[in-house]
């Protein structure tokens, strides 16, 4: 899509924000996939607890980054705030992101607790049933996360704008 009526500065700002936004989303997807791959009862070990903690910290930073860049896209992007604020598909996308965030709270809290226990006991391994429960939550999280690019594609094509 070209923006012939946009200043080159606005077009470049929009491009950079879109690129950064997409790279962060791909990063979030990668981190979620890595956490899910690690969150298996058969593969759980003290080293896995450490890795889960690192990936979960990266997930938190990326989630914060996507909020900041998303806000900047709404405010400074080529489409302008009106495009987003009055589009129910945008709000569905924001809602899906919020649901993903809410689902991720329990796994994050458990991973933090596991890390604390692992510092006190180098041989600590979480209970297999707890790992299985968190894995199911993470699967739900990834499925809801999958709605976000679908909603983004709909929104980019003007769906929801009346």
Image (cartoon, helix red, strand yellow):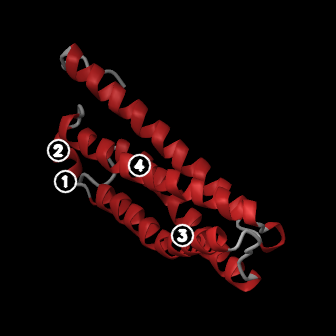
Task: Please rate how many residues cluster around mark 1, counting C-alpha atoms within 10 Å: few if below 14, some from 14 to 19, many from 20.
Answer: few
Q: Is there CB contact under 8 Å for labels 1 and 3? A: no
**Residue assigned mark 3:** 112
| Distance (Cα) linking label 1 and label 3 | 36 Å
Q: Mark 4 touching mark 1, by CB under 8 A?
A: no
Tell us which disc is closer to us: 1 or 3: 3
Q: Earlier in the sequence, mark 3 or mark 4?
A: 3
x, y percent for residue 95: 35, 65
The disc, 4 or 1, on the residue closer to the chain's N-terminal end is 1
Q: Residues within 10 Å of mark 3 (few under 14, many from 20)?
A: some
Tell me the CA gap for discs 4 and 2: 15 Å
Crowdedness near tag 4: few (<14), some (14–19) or many (≥20) residues, C-alpha within 10 Å: some
Q: Residue at x 63, y 68 (%)?
A: 119
Q: CA distance from mark 1 to mark 2?
A: 6 Å
Residue lying at 19% horizontally and 55% vertically, measured from the top left: 86
Up the image or down, 12 lies above or below 116; here it is above
């Amino acid at each position: 899509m070209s923006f012939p009526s946009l200043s080159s500065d606005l077009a470049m700002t929009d491009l950079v924000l879109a690129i950064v936004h997409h790279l962060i989303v791909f990063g979030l997807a990668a981190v979620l996939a890595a956490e899910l791959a690690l969150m298996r009862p058969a593969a759980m070990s003290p080293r896995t607890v450490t890795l889960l903690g690192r990936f979960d910290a990266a997930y938190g930073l990326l989630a914060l980054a996507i909020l900041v860049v998303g806000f900047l896209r709404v405010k400074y992007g080529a489409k302008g705030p009106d495009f987003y604020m009055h589009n129910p598909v945008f709000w569905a996308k924001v809602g899906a992101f919020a649901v993903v965030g809410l689902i991720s709270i329990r796994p994050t809290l458990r991973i933090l607790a596991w890390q604390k226990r692992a510092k006190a006991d180098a041989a600590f391994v979480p209970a297999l049933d707890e790992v299985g429960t968190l894995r199911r939550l993470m699967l739900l999280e990834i499925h809801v996360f999958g709605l976000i690019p679908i909603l983004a594609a709909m929104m980019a094509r003007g769906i929801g704008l009346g």
